Image: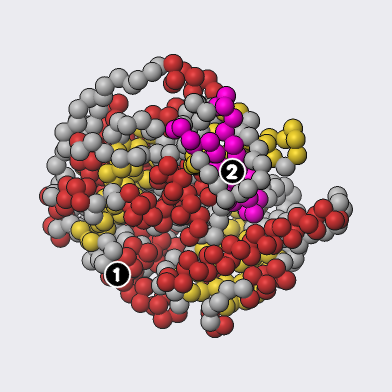
Amino acid sequence: MSAGQSIARVWVDSPLPQLDRLFDYRVPPALATELRIGLRVRVPWRSAGRFVDAYVVDLVDTVEFTGVLSEVEALVSSVPVLAPEVAALARKAADRAAGSAIDIVRVAVPGRQARVEKAWLASGESARLPAVTAVPAIGYVAGRIEAAVTHGARLAIDAIPLGTEVSKGVWTGQWAATLAAAASVSVASGKTAIIAVPDFRDQEQLAMALAAVLPAERIVRLDARQSNPDRYRAFLRCLGDDALVIIGNRSVVYAPAKKLGLIGVWDDGDPLHSEPLAPYVHTRDAALLRQEQQGCALLFVSHSRSTEVERLVELGWLETVSPSPSVLPKVIPTAAQSSGDRLAVQARIPSSAWREASDAVKHGPVLIQVARPGYAPRLACVDCGQSARCVRCEGPLAQKTSRSIPACSWCGALAVDWRCDNCEGTKLRLIGAGGASRTAEDLGRAFPGVRIIVADGDRPILSVGPEPALVIATRGAEPRALGGYRAVLLLDGDKMAARESLRVGEDCLRWWSNATALAARGAPTFLVGVGGALASALSTWRQSDYARAELVDRRRLRFPPAVRVASVTGSRDAVATAVAAVTIAPEDVLGPVETGQGAVRTILRFDYASGAAVATELRAEVIRSATSRRRSLASKGATGTLPANLRVRFDDVEPFGA
């Protein structure tokens, strides 16, 4: 701490929204030489003898307060874990979403692991890391990536839908190789790269692509799936001055990096990039804010562009980079029903796709994507056809295998001695198309002697070999194949597209595009049972056209991302008061509608230019409601019913799903 800086300004680690501001504490002489910005400290709170954790955000010599300041009680750690650039990002992102900065800090900074920290401090200065040479990217982005990293450009990159051998016997998607090449450019220039991916499957591919072009010492994984000690150890590595590549899921976008050269986001349309914790800041939004803050390069890479990215492209905020038509896949839309082999009909595969798959599986693996896991979507009474329901919770009954006891899809209760409440029947039959397990059984009978592999949420498989096999996978769980699949069949497309969601078209294109990209060069992909704009966009590989048309429709209907939205949830009175405090046009207020347990929800729609003002006004109402609720709690003591907390969520499309 510099001479004269005798006052610490801190963020108190509290969930109360009214405490989302800086509090001032005097620095005691005993800590004057040790206190630094970013440290965890303990400070007294309200009454003597009670202390709370806090982060030092600033050190100053004077403040406007003229009374007597309390003193910082103690240092929790001597490591400045809250980097200034992360603190600034947390404040900006929280203000944009009408939330608390400390909530973002909890996502950004892992919990302290004392033993790990002591070992890290004892190790002293890190060893000199190996030098790095930038690796040239593949032709269509060659030059664009180097220029982007050098000048802090922002690109929307349409990934080549193919696999590539990044090192001998190691295959990844071309998207991973593209991001690895970009990261090597950043590290070679002495700057850190941060790359966010949706889940562990993508992270595994990215790690392999990076290992092929960078020394292992330059790569850091920072992921919520890690154990607490491993995550904290990785986090501490990011605090130094070394140029690194930091990879992980959505929270990695908050990794400390004072010299940041690149932020890369793979497949930003994946819902796993949506933060489920308040203030619900999406990876994409945090990346955009941080790029603006630190002036680094920003790459959004995907096979199928989201409407949010398309909007930024149309505004000129992002430049586009697309591959040559020569590397685009061969996608064949196919009718859901066609004459042919009885087993083909049973497996829901049209005859043309059946013939292709039968030939392709002789030479290597074939991928079959289905809509859902399990054995069958639902069961019904044999006698009257009524859907079979759980006697405990009225949920639908389903089977995982043909021999398993039916169980409730909601509560999991086994339907032993089930009896139909309509006709007293006791026998069940399968209704609708089968899930992954049922499809595997059907194909096992149709292809005797061929290896059958099932990949879904319960059976995660990252990769398969080049040997002949039928791989049945649910959407998003498809393993990559060494050398690529010899054919890809996208089943149940009509059922996927029938889901009630504002994003259903985007999601379907993303699921199908990512699966198609797993095919070998020249191998066919059959899209079964889907026509219209979705089939056209996939078969011509012009997903951006679909996103553009979708954005036009949403502008007309004033749906996100054409406009910003905020959902306000709480008691009827609290919501009405909060909405009344916001100065927007009355026709842009939707609701209130009941959400259960005495709460209602109102949706506000407004232009992007009004976002800061709306967030400020709603945040003030959240604080006012919280303080009023606290006073009510104090007056009622331990008894009495209080209204639900006022909750605000920005840019949430869930209310538009039905």
Q: Quadrant of residue 51?
A: top right
Residue at image coords 51%, 41%: 61
Which residue corresponds to the image point at 33% horizontal and 21% vertical from the top-left? 126
Mark 1, secondary structure of its residue: loop
Q: Viewer-proximal residue, 311 or 317?
A: 317
324 sits left or right of 609 in the view: left
Magenta stretch contains residue 14: yes
* Residue at (40% x, 39% y) in the render: 256
129 relative to 454 in the view: left or right: left
Q: Secondary structure at mark 2?
A: strand
Percent x, y for residue 72?
61, 33
Residue 41 at what x, y percent from top left? Answer: 58, 33
- Region of the chain picked out in magenta, as a range: 2-31
Q: Which residue is mark 2?
A: 24
Residue 89 counted in the magenta span:
no
Residue found at the very far top of the displayed protein = 122
In the drawing, what numbered circle is on residue 315? 1
Q: Residues within 10 Å of mark 2 (few under 14, many from 20)?
A: many
Colour mapping: secondary structure
